[in-house]
Image: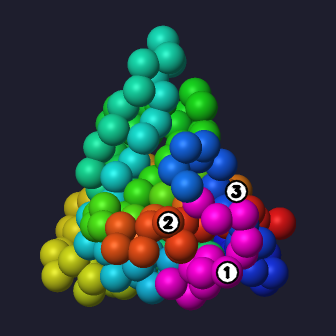
Amino acid sequence: MAKLKDKSPKATRPYIPGYGLPKSKKGLLQWKWAEDRLKKSRQYWIATTRPDGRPHVMVIWALWMNGLLYFSTGAKSRKAQNLEKNPHCTMCTDHAAQAVILEGVVETERNVEWIRDFVPRYEKKYNWKLGEMGDKMIALQDPVFYLRPRVAFGLWEKKFQSSATKWIFP
């Protein structure tokens, strides 16, 4: 199973001119704030790029584990095809008022023993039996992916000006 490096990401302000963000680091969100939302989110948005450069956005289910966002999709899905050509993507939590946005590179999990562990965790979170889909994941016929974040943003609407945060990963 892959794992994010143990070091926490560095918190800073995002570059969004004209929004009146303070220059100081006072009020920046803690990385735990982001991780709590990544764990609790039910749906996630994934944005990939088609081979011709057009964007593709879709809702998916995922699990935040070990500092990475794990998800699966059919091997022939548009998402999987896009990620095969370009593994860079953006994924977001479901509540825009307390948004966490991850940008990074997607990799394929190939450890079958870990996928055997992933399937019941996924089923428990979503209260849904994967059945044949889970069997295909374990047989490495349908991919299990993980997003390794390079940068993340935390945007809390009620405290936007004081708390807007950008995290940079080592």
Which disc is residue 76 wearing? none
Residue type at tag 3 = Arg
- The kind of residue tagged 2 is Gln
Q: In the rendered view, tell whether residue 59 sits above or below residue 93.
A: above
In the image, residue 170 sits, relative to residue 29, either above or below, namely above
Q: Is residue 100 left or right of residue 58?
A: right
- Quarter of the rendering containing residue 57: top left
Residue 32 lies in magenta, yes or no?
yes
* Front residue of 138 and 154: 154
Name the residue rendered at 44%, 67% in the picture.
Answer: 160
Residue at x 67%, y 81% (from the top left corner): 26
The residue carrying mark 3 is: 150
Q: Categorize mark 3 by other alpha carbons within 10 Å: few (<14), some (14-19), many (20+).
A: some
* In front: label 3 or label 1: 1
As measured in the structure, the alpha-carbon distance from the residue carrying label 3 to the one carrying label 1 is 23 Å
The earlier-in-sequence mark between 3 and 1 is 1
Magenta segment range? 21-33
Name which of mark 2 and mark 1 comes first in the sequence.
Answer: 1
Rendering quarter of residue 158: bottom left
Q: Look at the numbered discs 2 and 1 and tell me whether their residues touch, using CB distance below 8 Å.
A: no
The colouring scheme, among rainbow, by chain, secondary structure or one colour, is: rainbow
Q: CA distance from mark 2 to mark 3?
A: 23 Å
Q: What's the residue type where badge 1 is placed?
A: Lys
Q: Position of residue 113 (x, y in %)?
A: 56, 78
Return the mark for residue 161: 2
